[in-house]
Image (tube, helix red, strand yellow):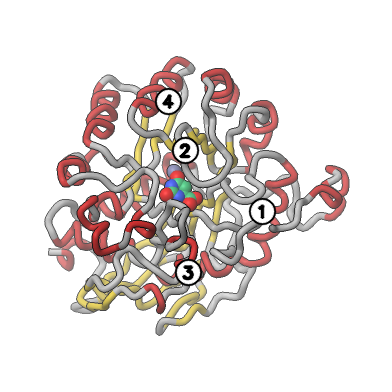
């Protein structure tokens, strides 16, 4: 079925646009033993992603000009695919966030507990950000259960778009469908793990490794996500690398690496007849581009051997996490080549791009390379070193 639908180079090779992952955690600066801009973007290319959007729950979190410049610099030195950076919404950065809006791809608001210090518990800052952050740039919410309703309602009052990250429950997807039916400006994403794993899988994944936020859910929740794929705007990996040692510790941090397993799982949905390849391209490319106003990547494509079978082994992956919740699963569909802006950047299982060749899709007005501007900001003294 797949072959009939898109560009077919030969019987088994599909040519697809470069995939976009709008929700990636790269840990740089602050926790580069888990991932940095180089290891994470190498994992992205291997997985068929030519653009990733980095989340702000780094250490320190990306919430102001200084931390944004530090992240822009780290990315400019190390990224091998194109990228955007999402800013974090804090209790005391409402004005600063609004001012930095044009330099970032979104404002991330954490309305429930997850990894890192960014969490908005009070209604005041939530409403202030909703009211002041530029409407052209979306507000992306980590919201679960009731906070999904709160985020949608608050955004609607200000007549601004809002995006709900990693929807995982039946109630949530049905609420979003109802809001969309009323014409409310809300978009949403789902992750491969919430589409493929249930709580029953924790027995073989292991309790610590299984921790993720939102937690994987029940068969009924997975079935509801699958039944409502038509209103899911984006697929997003929520690639959230932590080391095996951390995941097997007494206090395991939540999160799964996902960049290198996502495409095969998206293709599995197509093989199952749940979506067409056209839908897959919409959710992995067209819709994130539309909602985040991303530039087109000229001369950029990936080649995928759709019949190639391989077994997922974290130890063989490029992510520094070196594990996967899909360990041992037979995957179908392998990226054989990635061409980014005319250059072959991944082929024969090797990343060919040089660190720093990736481009920021929101070219910084605070020039990342400019010591002058950093000095003007006082950032040369204040950039906190990774801990
Ligand atoms: O499981 C998660 N891990 N969920 C999140 O929202 C954050 C992420 C992380 O950064 O590790
Ligand atoms: Zn989240
Ligand atoms: Zn996340």
Query: Label 1, label 3: how many angstroms apart (C-alpha)?
Result: 19 Å
Query: Label 4, label 1: how many angstroms apart (C-alpha)?
Result: 27 Å
Nearest to N terminus: mark 2 or mark 4: 2
**Residue 23 in sight in this render:** no
CB of mark 2 within 8 Å of CB of mark 3?
no
- Crowd around label 4: few <14 · some 14–19 · many ≥20 (10 Å): many
The residue that disc 3 covers is 319
Q: Residue furthest top?
A: 157
- Mark 2 and ligand 1: say if the CB distance to the nearest ligand atom is below 8 Å: no
The residue that disc 1 covers is 71
Quarter of the picture holding the C terminus: bottom right
Query: Label 2, label 4: how many angstroms apart (C-alpha)?
Result: 15 Å
Residue at image coords 68%, 65%: 77
Query: Is 151 displayed left or right of 381 in the figure?
Result: left
Query: Is 133 displayed left or right of 316 in the figure?
Result: right
Query: Label 2, label 1: how many angstroms apart (C-alpha)?
Result: 23 Å
Q: Give residue 19's position: percent from left, percent from top.
A: 39, 59
The residue that disc 2 covers is 113
Nearest to N terminus: mark 1 or mark 3: 1
């Amino acid at each position: 079925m797949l072959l009939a639908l898109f560009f077919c180079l030969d019987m088994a090779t599909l040519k697809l646009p470069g995939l976009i992952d709008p929700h990636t955690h790269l840990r740089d600066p602050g926790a580069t033993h888990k991932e940095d801009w180089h290891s994470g973007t190498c994992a992205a290319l291997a997985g068929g992603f030519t653009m990733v959007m980095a989340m702000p729950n780094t250490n320190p979190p990306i919430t102001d000009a200084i931390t944004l410049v530090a992240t822009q610099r780290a990315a400019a030195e190390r990224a091998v695919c194109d990228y955007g950076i999402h800013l974090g919404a804090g209790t005391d950065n409402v004005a600063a966030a609004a001012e930095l809006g044009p330099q970032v791809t979104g404002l991330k608001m954490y309305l429930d507990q997850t990894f890192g210090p960014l969490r908005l518990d009070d209604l005041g800052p939530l409403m202030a950000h909703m009211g002041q952050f530029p409407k052209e740039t979306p507000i992306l919410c980590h919201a679960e259960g009731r906070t999904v309703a709160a985020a949608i309602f608050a955004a609607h009052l200000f007549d601004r778009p809002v995006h709900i990250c990693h929807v995982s429950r039946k109630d949530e997807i049905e609420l979003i469908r109802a809001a969309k039916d009323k014409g409310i400006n809300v978009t949403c994403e789902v992750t491969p793990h919430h589409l493929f794993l249930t709580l029953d899988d924790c027995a073989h994944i292991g309790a610590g490794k299984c921790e993720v936020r939102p937690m994987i859910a029940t068969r009924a929740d997975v079935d509801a996500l699958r039944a409502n794929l038509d209103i899911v705007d984006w697929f997003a990996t929520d690639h959230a690398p932590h080391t095996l040692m951390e995941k097997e510790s007494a206090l395991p941090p939540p999160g799964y690496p996902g960049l290198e397993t996502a495409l095969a799982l998206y293709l599995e949905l197509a093989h199952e007849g749940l979506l067409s390849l056209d839908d897959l391209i919409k959710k992995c490319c067209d819709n994130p581009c539309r909602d985040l106003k991303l530039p087109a990547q000229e001369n950029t494509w990936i080649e995928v051997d759709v019949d190639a079978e391989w077994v997922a082994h974290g130890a063989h992956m490029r992510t520094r996490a070196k594990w996967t919740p899909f360990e041992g699963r037979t995957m179908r569909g392998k990226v054989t080549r990635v061409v980014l802006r005319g250059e072959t950047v991944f082929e024969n299982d090797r990343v060919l791009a040089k660190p720093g060749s990736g481009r920021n899709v929101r070219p910084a007005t605070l020039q990342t390379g400019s010591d002058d501007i950093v000095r003007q900001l006082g950032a040369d003294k204040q950039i906190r070193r990774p801990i």
